[in-house]
Image (tube, grey):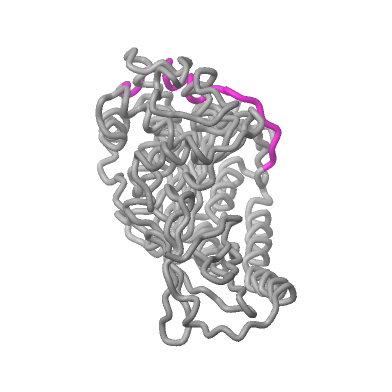
Amino acid sequence: MIAALVLSATVNLTQFDARIEQAMRDMHTPALAVAVVQNDKVIYQRSFGATPEQRFYLASVPKSMTALTARLLAQDKKLDLDAPLTTTLPQLKLPPPLDPSRMSVRDLLTHRLGFENDPVTWRASYSGDWSDEQMFALLEKYTTVTERKFSYDNLGYLLASYAVERASGESWSSTLNARVLAPVGMTHTSNEPCVPTKSPRTMNRGSGGLCSTIGDMTRWLRVNLSDGMLDGKRVFPLAAMREVHAPQISLNRKFGRLNRYAYGLGWYLADHEGDVVVHHFGSYAKAWAHVSWMPDRNIGVVVLANEMNPLPDSVALLAYDSLLGREDAAARFDKEVASLREQLAKIPSQVEKFATKIRDESKDSDRALTSYAGTYADEALGTFVVREENGSLQATIGDRSAPLVHVRGDAFYVQWFPNDSPDRVTFAGDSLTWSDRTLTRR
């Protein structure tokens, strides 16, 4: 029999708080919010560097909400998760040999598409330069074949949100709100951007398009931890909850201390030292979200942060280790934070190494920086605008802007987000090469 778990009995709350605050300083994380649930009761909730009302970007965590929305529509016979996409998403056309008649919404929700499309993913997640018609045109023209197995990305859930819209007759956001958010009482959760790295056009629809508060996300954790029950009332059908939480496709992947062995509908299943952990995380520039629970222990954790580093995952594991009475909980946490801090410290040198490689591969050029300014276009990636500002260049594509750093000759690099991997940009006459595409000056 599993002994009753009480956080205050296994860890001093003051020390718990102090350890998190120190880790936030070490990881340069301005705001972080934590909630721990046991037996449907919130036994710990604290916001660090923020008010309880602060909204955090959830990144990929809302995939679980999109999947549940689709499953609820299936419950009402409005959407068949296993029907051919030619029936549920007829506007989707793919280049041969890809055949939508041999794919289903369930394939989209379990990341076993068998295809990818970088331009669509870029536009939806990063540039915001898209329309519905343009997305489906790009899918028809620029989709490439991949192996038909689990391959995590945003594309499947982006397409699933269109299937949800067709089935419900309403927008994805309206359907999500009516079917999931409102019933749970998540009144502070919406697709309105809450971080400077996101715009309304890059909120990513069904694959990651929400901001929320620690209070709302704690309700989301509770309703999942209780298989659809909340405050003594059934909010979602038991059959629907059991299906989204059940393994749909097998995995063998390690993520930190978690050994992921399956993916359900919007949820990972993993083993953590003998305990099952159902979870989904999300990360993006200026955001990291963690939602997880141990069903056999009836405990769960939500951690939200406004910086892109996996500190929330470590905080959650600290909570679990503390709840389970592991004497080395604090030491394990401190060791993980030290490792994360070392990785963060390496980023500037990694960027410099990238720049050095470009410098060594490039020739000198007598072109003035101002000569590179202009508008460059590509059907797949969109419009890339280069402007001269105060003796340096600025690159803009859609809603995203960043300095274009000159390395040598006609070679530059751009970091679209702080601490992100840089991209190489090379000019040649009236064109530039970026992301394996050549964009032509207009």
Residue 286 versus residue 299 in the image, above or below: below
Q: Furthest residue to the top?
A: 77
Query: What residue sits 62% from the left and 31% below the top?
Result: 150
* Spot occupied by residue 140 in the image (x, y as percentages of width and height): 48, 35
Q: Position of residue 173 (x, y in %)?
A: 29, 37
Identify which residue, 284 or 370, lies in the foreground.
370
Within the magenta stretch, is there residue 73?
no
| In the image, residue 411 above or below residue 188 | below
Looking at the picture, tell me which residue is in the foreground, 172 or 117: 117
Residue at point 37%, 60% (across, down)? 399
The C terminus: image quadrant: bottom left
Residue 111 visible in the shown view: yes
Quadrant placement of the N terminus: top right
In the image, taking residue 349 as reference, residue 106 lies left or right, namely left
Magenta-drawn segment: 234-254
Q: Residue at x 38, y 53 (%)?
A: 128
- The correct choice, above or below, for 258 with respect to 195 in the image is above
Viewer can see residue 22 = no
x and y percent of residue 372 in the render? 50, 76
The answer to if 240 sits in the magenta stretch is yes
Q: Residue at x 63, y 61 (%)?
A: 337
Quadrant of res 162: top left
- Looking at the picture, tell me which residue is in the foreground, 234 or 378: 378
Number of marks: 0
Residue located farthest toward the right when viewing the structure as drawn: 360
Residue 274 in percent (x, y) is at: 68, 32
